[in-house]
Amino acid sequence: MTSTAKKILDEALALPEDDRRRLGEALLDSVPRECSEGVEGAWRDEVVRRIEEVRGGDVTPEPWSEVKKHIREALDR
């Protein structure tokens, strides 16, 4: 992520929840649809793979609170 994008993200995260949601939707709508269709299929395959890993005991899921903490720490670097 570029420094400009990081700055925008930091400012966006400070917005009220409704504004963040609207901003996120606007950003997603700006991505060309033909790009999204291929991505959606890849994500579907990834989700199925991860579900199988969890069900098979190969992976232990983390609580959302821990995941958010890791994400924030990564973005602060």
Image: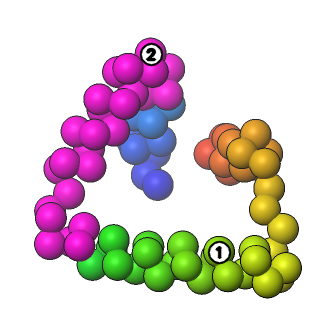
Q: Main secondary structure of the magenta part?
A: helix
35 magenta-colored: yes
Magenta-colored span: 12-37
Tag 2 or tag 1, which sits nearer the N-term?
A: 2
Q: Looking at the image, which is closer to me, 60 or 27?
A: 60
Question: Is 73 situated left or right of 60 in this image?
Answer: left
71 versus 54 height, above or below: above
Q: Looking at the image, which is closer to me, 44 or 7?
A: 44
Q: Which residue is drawn at the image coordinates 80% and 56% (left, top)? A: 62
9 versus 41 height, above or below: above
- Picture disc at residue 3: none
Res. 37 image quadrant: bottom left
What residue did someone put label 1 on? 51
What residue did someone put label 2 on? 16
Q: Is residue 63 visible?
A: yes
Q: Is residue 77 visible?
A: no
The percent position of residue 6, horizontal first and vertical second, equals 47, 41
Amino acid, disc 2: Pro
Rounded to the nearest angstrom, the CA distance separating label 1 from label 2 is 33 Å
- Foreground tag (1 vs 2): 1
Q: Which residue is drawn at the image coordinates 55% and 79% (left, top)? A: 48
The percent position of residue 75, horizontal first and vertical second, equals 62, 45
70 versus 34 height, above or below: above
The percent position of residue 44, horizontal first and vertical second, equals 43, 75
Q: Helix, strand or loop at disc 1?
A: helix
